[in-house]
Image (cartoon, grey):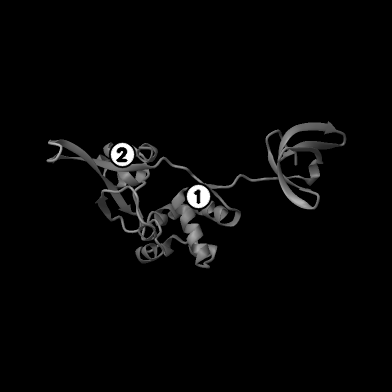
Amino acid sequence: MKFKKGDKVQFIREGSMVEGVVKEVKDCSPDMWYLIDDKCKDSWIFGGHLILLTPLPVIPQFVADAIDTFKDEGDSLSVAIDYEVYTDELVKELSLDKTMRGWLWETSNQELFARAWMDGYKVKKEPLYYVRFPLTFWDEDKAELEDIYRYLRLNVTSDETEISGRTTVSEWQKADGWRTQLTEKQIKDIDEAYWGFKVPVEEVDGE
C-alpha cells in the first residue's frame, strides 16, 4: 500500500504499537520509506511496517449513549443494533433517546452503529440551546417591572416537557431522561415556535 503525506498510521516501535502521521515520502529503491511524526519523534519507517488508520465513525451523542448503555448491560451488538428492541418500555427503563428506533431504521445508520460499536467512535458536536421564556412581573418592593426567565425541559425517553426556573437538572433527573440543553431538531420537534426562544448554552452559562 502506498501512503501519502498526512495519512494517520500505526507501526511498532521498540516493541509497542504507536500512532503517527506521515510527514514526508521518500523514494528509496526498491521500496518506499516514510517519515513518521510520533509525539515529536521523527524516524524513517519501512512502508511494509505501516498500517493505515481508519478514521473513527462520528455519531450523535444519543447514539453514543445507547452504545455505552447496552455494553454496560452486557448485551451484544446483535441486540443493540436491532431497532425493534427500542420499545417505549425499554427506552424508558434504560433512559435512552426514543429517536434511536427511527435512527437505526436507516440501513446506513446500522452500518455506522456497528463500526462505532466495534472500533470506537467520535461524538458529533451539535450546537446546544436552552429554550428560554421571558416573564415580566411587577416588583412591589422596587416599584418597577422585573424580568425573569423560565426554561423548557424535555424528557428524551417519553417526549414529556415541563417549564422550570433552572437550566440545570439533577443527576437523578438526567438518569430519568430529562434535558434542558437541546439540539435544534429536538426543539423544533416539540414546537417550531419554540425555536424563536432559543438561546445558545454558552451565552446563558456565561452570564
Q: Where residue 100 appears, x then y in whole percent?
A: 42, 55
Q: State the residue position of label 1.
A: 108
- Whether residue 40 appears in this view of the structure is yes
Q: Amino acid at mark 1?
A: Ser
Query: What SS does tag 1 mark?
Result: helix
Query: Mark 1–mark 2 contact, CB under 8 Å?
Result: no
Q: Residue furthest front?
A: 141
- In-front residue for pair 91/202: 202
Please name the residue shown 15% across and 37% down the image: 142
Query: Quadrant of the image for the N terminus?
Result: top right
Quadrant location of residue 87? bottom left
Query: What SS does tag 2 mark?
Result: strand
Q: Is residue 145 above or below residue 84?
A: above
On screen, residue 4 versus residue 202, left or right, reads right
- In-front residue for pair 116/72: 72
- Whether residue 81 appears in this view of the structure is no
Label 1 to label 2, Cα distance in Å?
31 Å
Q: Residues within 10 Å of mark 1 (few under 14, many from 20)?
A: few
Q: State the residue position of label 2.
A: 198
